[in-house]
Image: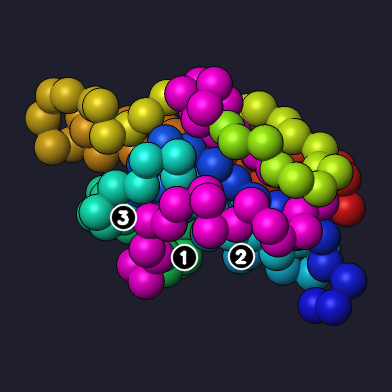
């Protein structure tokens, strides 16, 4: 949509939380927001369990590629959201005026336990991102 606001979602590895958030925003708020995601230290790939968690909700993020935030610094943004404390601390300065917001989520990639217990953490983070981050952007439409 031509007049959709642009949001950049930042995490450290850009493999779980920011990828899930990008998927949610582009799925649920496409009429008013366009989301991209990036990392301060991008991982090699999107975490397979993040892909699985989002697929359970009918959202395909399997084509996501972790990207460096440096690639996006010169682009115009309406909002930059950091979704992990590390990314907040190392977030670069954007040259243009941009509002920043921090909404922290635990890193599901650090979960331990059985396969089902780990998957439960991915689902919980996925659902929390939908509730808090998508909810915040919904209020800003």
Which comes before the other along the chain, label 1 or label 3?
3
Q: Residue 111's spot in the image, x, y percent?
A: 24, 26
Which quadrant of the view contains residue 92?
top right
> Would you place residue 88 above or below residue 17 in this image?
above
Q: Is mark 2 on a helix, strand or loop?
A: helix
Q: Is residue 123 visible?
A: no
Q: What stretch is highlighted in magenta?
A: 62-90
Q: Is mark 1 on a helix, strand or loop?
A: loop
Are the residues flagged by discs 2 and 1 in contact, CB closer than 8 Å? yes
> Is residue 76 rendered magenta in the image?
yes
Q: Is residue 60 visible?
A: yes
Q: Name the residue that disc number 1 marks.
A: 59
Q: Residue 49's spot in the image, x, y percent?
A: 26, 49
Image point (75%, 45%), residue name: 95
Q: Distance between the Cα atoms at labels 2 and 1? A: 7 Å
Q: Name the residue that disc number 2 marks.
A: 27
Q: Is mark 3 on a helix, strand or loop?
A: loop
- Residue sitting nearer the eye, 1 or 89: 89
Q: Disc 1 or disc 3, which is closer to the eye?
A: 3
Give the left or right position of residue 35, taking residue 23 as reference: right
Q: Name the residue that disc number 3 marks.
A: 46
């Amino acid at each position: 949509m031509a007049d959709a606001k642009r949001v950049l979602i930042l995490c450290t590895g850009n493999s779980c939380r920011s990828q899930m958030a990008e998927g949610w925003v582009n799925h649920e708020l496409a009429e008013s927001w366009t989301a991209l995601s990036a990392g301060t230290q991008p991982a090699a790939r999107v975490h397979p369990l993040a892909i699985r968690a989002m697929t359970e909700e009918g959202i395909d993020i399997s084509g996501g590629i972790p990207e460096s935030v440096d690639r996006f610094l010169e682009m115009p943004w309406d909002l930059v959201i950091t979704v992990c404390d590390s990314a907040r601390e190392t977030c670069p300065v954007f040259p243009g005026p941009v509002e920043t917001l921090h909404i922290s989520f635990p890193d599901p990639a650090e979960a331990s336990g059985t396969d089902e217990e780990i998957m439960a953490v991915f689902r919980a983070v996925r659902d929390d991102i939908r509730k808090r981050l998508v909810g915040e952007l919904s209020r800003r439409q």
